Image (cartoon, coloured by chain):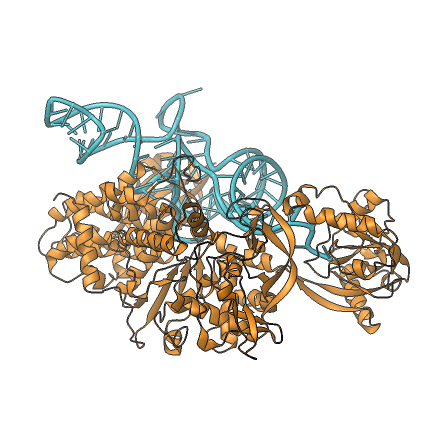
Amino acid sequence: MQYDFKKIEKKWQDKWAEQNVFAASADATKKKRYALIEFPYPSGDGLHVGHTRPYTAMDVVSRKHRMEGYNILFPMGWDAFGLPTENYAIKHKIHPEIVTQKNITRFREQIKALGYGIDWDREINTTDPSYYKWTQWIFLKMFEKGLAYKKKTTVNWCTSCLCVLANEEVVDGSCERCSATVVHKEKEQWMLKITAYAERLLNDLDDLDYIERVKTSQRNWIGRSVGAEVLFSTTAGDDLRVFTTRPDTLFGATYMVISPEHPVIDQWADKISNLDAIRAYREEAALKSDFERSELAKDKTGVRIEGVCAINPANGEEIPVFVSDYVLMSYGTGAIMAVPAHDTRDYEFAKTFDLPIVEVVAGGDISKEAFTDCERGTMINSGFLNGLPVKDAQKKMISWLSDNGKGEAKVNYKLRDWIFSRQRYWGEPIPIVHCEKCGFVGVPENELPVTLPYVESYEPTETGESPLAKITEWVNTTCPTCGGPAKRETDTMPQWAGSSWYYLRYTDPNNDTALASPDALNYWMPVDWYNGGMEHTTLHLLYSRFWHKFLYDIGVVPTKEPYQKRTSHGFILGEGGEKMSKSRGNVINPDDIVRQYGADTLRLYIMFIGDFEKTAVWSNSAIKGCSRFIEKVIALAEKVKPGNEYSKELETAMHKTIRKVSSDIEELKFNTAIAAMMALVNQMADVGGPNEAEFQTLLKLLHPFAPHITEELYEKYNKGMLVMSSWPVYDEAKTVDDSVEIAVQVNGKLRGTVVISSTAEKDEAVAVVKADEKIAAALAGMQIVKEIFVPGRLVNLVVKPAK
RNA sequence: GCGGGUAUGGCGGAAUUGGCAGACGCGCCAGACUUAGGAUCUGGUAUCUUUGAUAUGCAGGUUCAACUCCUGUUACCCGCACCA
């Protein structure tokens, strides 16, 4: 048979579609599996081979589970709002909506050509008003509960996109999207209070089946630290609050440092004698990008505030207060107590400014460096703490602080609230109206969605306002509360909004009275298995867990967590091990591969390429192996023996392969599953061909990986489609060979092999070994000290020279 | 600096979790069929000084037995990064 993959693949894709075999059933009595892949951003470049790795993997898993009798939900959609589309639209003067439609059409065709078992009736699109109505609805609920608020804050400002970025979108001080420099700017922004969920986002990780590295990076990102908040009174009258993880070292606090943005600077303006210098320093810090700040991290800079001193609450000493940009306004209280003897940064700063360094924990050598180890050391120079180990001193100091009203135990998080507004056109409008009398008012639910007005010009403005601000007829509205004149919020939501809840919409994509019906959510949630990129661990994955927990709290979703299991795939690099990029000219386009080899070959190869979780290098020659494998299977079809004639040997191999492929798929070991099938096919060819039942079993095992050709070969048996067939089961008893070849070692060195019955006991095995000529020769003149027998594996004889 | 990970033939990678290192595939070599082969088929393929010895980044250790466990060390990759 000529392998006409083009015809075969089209034929089966059409058949599956005609019979709607991938539609998730509404029958809630069936056992379900919800498998999810991150829906793509439909970029102008089209599908990347990198996409096919997670998609194929989850398709393989889903197809197997479907054959095992599960009701499968395996959906697809488009995360289509975002900057690249908008930038492209501006450059080419085409409306983003049109660009998006075009890109989606292309992506859909490309994905369909790969034969995934996707329920296309549930396709969603984040830019569809009937979808973003609910994105806005969730925002309104958060606004009602006080979790969405507007605040003037220091933001990351991309100098090219002219737009605010989330902390997570700033990479090495540059914009994640366009790589332009990011600077700090003070702006009024909508914020989401993700910090209110920090504790739960952290603790609930324990019960989830996420791969460990995902849990670890979320934990690090949330960054819980335990310590105390301490109040320092000042000569200016008001107090300075600091957070510290080392309350035990309070006696060693010889100065304080506040962030350049700290509000007390203005409060103290009339008392500061060097205000100009302080303000100049603040200006300078604001102009530095994050990148410049970290570049200069080695050299500590700062200015002493003249005219105001702080008082160390432990010993009542007056200590100076400095302004320095190594203290961040965004963490803790924006002020620190500096203990140079026991903190590396404080130590550097003290050396630079020639400040006193007082040792309060003995155990290090503070003439050389700060002693920061909190596992050992004993308190000194610390009044009532003297002689205590560090841990005990911490507890004692905290209770002393709270007894005296000077502080309390405190937990702090690195996680910061999510800056949620963007000054761009192509995003969900924030459904808020600003009324001069009533303040911020949510758009009433029955007026949702607030649709994005169609405009001719969506260029970002130089003033940093959203392009929507220019559309006065849209901006000017009436206040839902008092009916007076009001203005609409003109900022839009960030890229991550629509993707924070999309998995919920798939369960009931056309519902227009709720984001999804309770029945659908009860049945389908949580997502059983979610595979996606590591790069989303602290972005999308964390954001969506936050939204989900909020929706759980207001009774909208039935589960505490959205995703029960999370796995992650490695990147695909171009030939030569470099990142695929247009400039390097090493981009592999899936369309070309499908045209040249067919979808089945691409699917097989992308699964065979290597360890699923690791980076893999594309090889244009290695893919031929998978193409040949398919042709071998086709050739094997010609050799199938009619009837039930079978060999014991092949039967054992069949059962072993079923076991291996079944477990490998669940463990993401697709490469070894395919290797096992290749070995089986080679063996089948060697014995002159399988019988019909054996060949059908092979087709079933291979079907999730290469669905089209296996359907084609299965068709002649008139048993219906493989898609709807049942997954093969193995019999453990039949996975055991009658006899096995075991290794024979003498003193741990391989000296030969013998074939024995697989049920042989130790005595029998050793007897056979001793009878073997080669072994006997090796044993000549030796005395056996110990005999080790590992059933089915080896015999090791420990010997020494006979006396 | 902190956190996570990786290291095995010419290449991608296996190894039932302490039991014959190199499965499976690519590439390569030889042969067959061919006017032809960058098609297909068959066989071979870790290295060497080959009755054997040496091999899983490097140096030790535990064990009858170590890619696997322990100690130390090097290199590379990926996050985060002045987080008090």
Q: Is residue B9 above or below residue B48?
A: below
Q: What colour has chain B?
A: cyan
Could you tell whether A711 is left or right of A339 in the image? left
Q: Nearer the viewer, residue A661 or B66?
A: A661
Q: Residue at x 37, y 50 (%)?
A: A51
In this view, which residue lies farthest toward the bottom? A482
Q: Residue A519: x, y in percent?
A: 37, 78
Q: Quadrant of residue A508?
A: bottom left
Q: Residue A662: x, y in percent?
A: 31, 58
Who's orange, chain-wise?
A
Q: Nearer the viewer, residue B29 or A367?
A: A367
Q: Residue A249: x, y in percent?
A: 81, 58
Could you tell whether A259 is left or right of B16 in the image? right
Q: Quadrant of residue A405?
A: bottom right
Q: Residue A292: x, y in percent?
A: 66, 43
Residue A687 visible in the snapshot: no
Residue A447 visible in the snapshot: yes
